[in-house]
Image: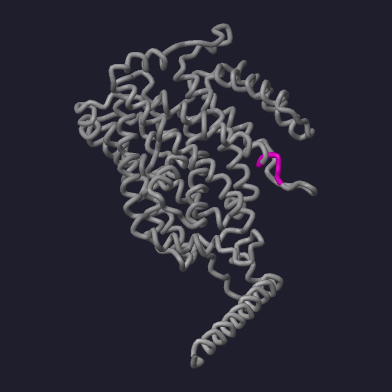
Amino acid sequence: MSAPTPRRTFLGRLSLPERRYLTDALRTETVGGVLLLVAAVVALVWANTPLKESYAAIRDFHFGPAALGLDLSVQHWAADGLLAIFFFVAGVELKRELVAGELRDPRAAALPVIAAVCGMAAPALVYALVNTIGGGTLDGWAVPTATDIAFALAVLAVIGTSLPSALRAFLLTLAVVDDLLAILIIAIFFTSDLNFLALGGAFAGLVVFWVLLRKGVRGWYVYVPLALVIWGLMYNSGVHATIAGVAMGLMLRCTTREGEEHSPGERVEHLIRPLSAGLAVPLFALFAAGVTLSGRAMTDVFTHPAPLGVLLGLVVGKAVGVFGGTWLTARFTKARLNPDLRWPDVFALATLAGIGFTVSLLIDELAFAGDATLTDEVKAAILMGSLIAAVLAAVLLKLRVRHYQALCAEEDRDEDHDGIPDVYEQDNPAYHLRMAEMYERKAAEHRERARLAGASRDEGDRPA
């Protein structure tokens, strides 16, 4: 008779290499998220002051080689050009998750993948329901489906909440799958008339890119010009140009070979992520988030079906979809929740996933490209919905902040000062011998202090 299969732990402790990678990646994303918040605030202030005409003039200024079909506005350069860097990093993240991260094990991947799928389906259904009842347009169904990991981490940084590494890993994996699904949505539903010659050229460029990687060719002076050519051809093909960034990111090798401390994908991601989080995404936000926030505009968010559907999709749909998908998957796969955490922790994280910004703004501009008024209304809804989701998540997370702080302190504790947290050394005899030696030294020190204290007291008790 075969032994019963042990129940898998959901949100369990990460491996040490995975924890170190996560810490490094999220540190950059958090800084980028704060810059993203600053850029969004600057855009809103700039677009709602007497200087708003200068904002519009800069945003709509065109430059670039017209002969190559690249005479674009500053806003389009930010959306189609700079965001390609963001999606390149997303492609590398996805590749790493598939070969070395949480998604490499199909059983472990089931929870974040299903949670992400449900977390995109539920907002789309909420949007469709609101607009069907209200007589609105279904064109924006995809707008509330995306989670902005940088914005979410910035909220955590601002409210001062340190999440345990398992929750942060789940949020990152959820966002990576979310990005993949958003990429597929953009590629399938927002592809204009195809230019097969340009598309063939982009495909040929990607083949050359792949061959050079497999041959071990190095040098940014080879890959950067090639990447620019691939991007330009992809843009002119009718397929959204950011797809080029994803495709190139997925081609990088993210597994280590003998003698390598880090894979090529991890090295490139380490170099490019600060550029993406610190420059590309904030600049996109600067020229995408500048909407006029009049009283009428705010009223329209809650009265017009399209923006209302986006707002409810982010605030209600995301929370219900992510939490419901996670709970049902754990229920039917009999996964056991980490005993240090509770389901309300997962719900708080699901609420935090309702912060949709970067990709939501991009899809908004694609979905309502011919209607500037509706585009701005939906932008306002994205900002309002993300703000509401952030506030709700902050309240829910603050209720458990002391528990999270205790868990993080336990994860980080390193009493033997060897650079490895103690929780990862419980099965290491050398660790316990080091700790025994440390405590023996401390015991000897305290015995000597006790002896000296006793001798001093005896001398004080003697008669003069």
Q: What residue do we see at 61% from left, 39% from top?
A: 92
Q: Give residue 452's position: percent from left, percent from top.
A: 58, 82
Which residue is found at the position 58% from the left and 52% from the top? Answer: 102
Give the residues in magenta.
262-266
Residue 128 at least partly seen: no
Residue 41 visible? The answer is yes
| Rendering coords of residue 156 (x, y %) | 42, 48
Relative placement, left or right, of 210 versus 170 is: right
Could you say where residue 353 lies in the image, as x and y percent from the top left?
A: 40, 46
Question: How many dots with numbers?
Answer: 0
- The answer to which image quadrant residue 312 occupies is top left
**Which residue appears at 60% of the width and 66% of the height?**
415
Query: Most extreme residue toward the bottom, as rendered?
Result: 463
Q: Residue at x 53, y 68 (%)?
A: 7
Instruction: Using the rendered view, name the quadrant where residue 56 is placed.
Output: top left
In the image shown, does 245 or 439 lie closer to the viewer?
439
Name, please, the residue furthest toward the top: 67
Q: Nearer the viewer, residue 94 or 83?
A: 83
Give coordinates of residue 112: x percent, y percent: 49, 51
> Image height check: is 367 above or below 449?
above
The magenta stretch spans residue 38: no
Pick whichever, 202 or 273, lies toward us: 273
The picture quadrant where one finds residue 286 is: top left
